[in-house]
Image: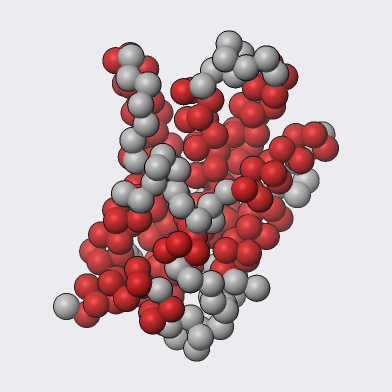
Amino acid sequence: MDRADNCRRAARDAVSDVEPPRLYDFIEETLEEASMLPGVFTLESAHELEPENDLEGIDRHAAGVQLIYEGLRLTRALAHEDPWTERSDEIDGDLEILAADILVARGFYLLARTDAAGKAVRTVQAFGRNETRRADDGNDSTDTDLERNVLELATLAGASAVGTTPTPALLETATELADTADPVLPPAEDAFPTHSREPAEATPEDGHRADRATSATDS
């Protein structure tokens, strides 16, 4: 199973007790269609910093980052396309708001006892300020501030999982990946080709992003 599949499975596990079934089904569908790039980049960051470290157990950190992104991304979509006036399915709009809250809350729960907890809080606060400012200005366009902050969160979550801190090279890669959002992030496999979770096989040569991050780290 590749890293994207592992991240998706861990994210699903974190919301497996959500009820009623209709709400759970919507969240599951959201995760099924989502780019797993935030979660995968969490794992890639951990591997870049500690190549010999067994990534077993880090899926929890990756899922936390992924869930926060999905919740905020859904909130942003709702803010820019009011489901109560632009769509006829008012109940679905209510469902989506509740799903977004649950996704963010579960993401916080997974990262609560990690060194990434503070950054998770700042990411949500920055998202709220940005969306409020844009609404006040009447600006209905989207930017990649959310994606950049979430991918920076991913580097910190990955680093904290292996007991270290992000390098400038990883933070630079986070910015580069955020710039590929249009407006949401592309599939994880576009940045990191599918490969095994085994450290021996998950080498920097498996992806051009990892190559760039590694060379920057060594310089």
Which residue reaches farthest bottom?
A: 200
Is residue 22 left or right of 139 when viewed as pictured?
A: right
Which residue reaches farthest right?
A: 21
Q: How many marks?
A: 0
Q: Quadrant of residue 50?
A: bottom left
**Above or below, comparing residue 151 to residue 52 in the picture:** above
Q: Residue 136 placed where, x, y %?
A: 33, 14
Quadrant of the image for the N terminus? bottom right
**Residue drawn 34% across the image and 41% down it:** 144
Q: What's the image's color scheme?
A: secondary structure
| Residue in front for this viewpoint, 106 or 69 | 69
| Residue in front for this viewpoint, 84 or 149 | 84
Q: Residue 26 placed where, x, y %?
A: 71, 38
Q: Quadrant of residue 105?
A: top right
| Residue in front for this viewpoint, 106 or 148 | 148
Q: Is residue 212 visible?
A: yes
Q: Residue 63 placed where, x, y %?
A: 57, 56
**Residue drawn 31% across the image and 49% down it:** 179
Which residue reaches farthest left?
A: 219
Q: Residue 213 placed where, x, y %?
A: 29, 71
**Residue drawn 46% across the image and 52% down it:** 186
Is residue 190 left or right of 18 when viewed as pictured?
A: left
Q: Is residue 50 visible?
A: no
Quadrant of the image for the C terminus? bottom left
**Residue drawn 75% across the image and 34% down it:** 23
Is residue 152 left or right of 31 when viewed as pictured?
A: left
